[in-house]
Image (spheres, grey):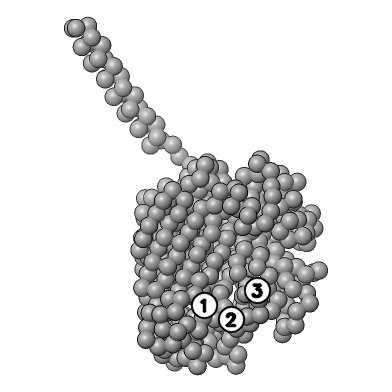
Amino acid sequence: MKHFAILLLVTVFACSNSGQKNKSESKMVTFEKGTYGYDLKVLQENTKPVELKSGNARILISPEFQGRVMTSTSEGKEGKSYGWINHDLIASGNVLEQINPVGGEERFWLGPEGGQFSIFFKKGDSFDFENWATPASLDTESFELVATSETEAEFSKSIQLKNYSDFLFQFDVNRKIVLLNQDEIKNKLGIYYQETVKSVGYQSVNELKNTGEKEWTKENGLLSIWLLGMFNPSPTVTIIIPYKTDAESDYIVKDDYFGKVSEDRLVVKNGFIFFKGDGKQRGKIGILPQRALPVLGSYDAENKLLTIVKCEIPEGVSEYVNSAWEIQEFPFKGDAINSYNDGPLEDGGQLGPFYELETSSPALALKSKEAAVFKQTTAHFEGTEEELNAICQQVFDISLEEIIEIF
């Protein structure tokens, strides 16, 4: 009995030491910048992120940053982190006045940005950068985490906003994000790919409900759901936006938001708009709903990474909010699809670098207590060029070789 007691004591001591050793070793594990593990650590040290998992596919969502998907990966903690994150700003704890560009590969915003119905400018202010400011409810205020599971998270927020024309919007936002398994990704995108392809995908379901007593009308201004994804640039990122060649519209692509985009960075060819996503020169483009198709994406040849975004473009609906920074003649002739490439500002500073893929819902004319929903699916694929080419052909009907040769 005495020998048994001594043996038990030794075993407990050994297990205790082993546990301490494992804890010590886990603390010593570090991840390189650019990995999902690195981003997870930064966010856990400064916020309380929600992580969804399905095998090695993972996404990080932040209640503090309006339920935005901060990043994702297809290979667990050691894998590439696909979303662009502003680590320095998040770690600093600073709150900036006009916008807090913390990053994130799908953030929930609302339009319009400019014009007589803008929610980013106060009544009577000139449409200059010093007067522009992101509403706190879309920038610094948290969304409430309503429910969560291994693969789903739901958020809500009650918001009041006045637009440039002094109309008060009262509404509830409900945002649900679902991590998709491989079969669900294939079904959502209507594709097939080999099991050897590394993938992660998720869908967001975004609802806006008019909780005020007044109907939302074109005379007072309308809102739209605006989803923006910030991704990591590289010299070999090409943004791919197919468009309807047989449609009639004022233009194929609006290319002068921040000065006209040069021809060596923007190519319109055979039903496709190609735009450089290298984070080296600031520019933004837009596609009207008459021309827009429900898919867009990007290919990073250096990292063998294909990103696809699929949204909803309702057939026959042409009224989208206009975000141009001016009093507008046509406030409901806005874009359905946008893309932004970051670059140095006039003072030499830079927000990123990153590039963005953006989608918008139509202008929402909601009666009191009426709601509208806008859905989007985002997926990333890593693999050989041959494997990714097969996916690209199915989604866009164009080869990776043709995309790579554009620039």
Residue 224 shows which numbered tag? 1
Q: Is residue 178 left or right of residue 90?
A: right
Q: Is residue 127 left or right of residue 275?
A: left
Say what secondary structure mark 1 lies in.
strand
Label 3 belongs to which residue?
285
**Mark 3 and mark 2: Cα distance apart in space:** 15 Å
**Residue 287 found in image quarter:** bottom right
Q: Residue at x 58, y 58 (%)?
A: 378
Q: Residue at x 51, y 45 (%)?
A: 54
Say what secondary structure mark 2 lies in.
loop
Closest to the observer, 75 or 224: 224
| Residue 128 visible in this rendered orientation of the protein | no
> Earlier along the polypeptide chain: callout 1 or callout 3?
1
At label 1, the amino acid type is Ser
At label 2, the amino acid type is Tyr
Q: Residue at x 75, y 79 (%)?
A: 247
Q: Position of residue 210 (x, y in %)?
A: 42, 79
Residue 320 shows which numbered tag? 2
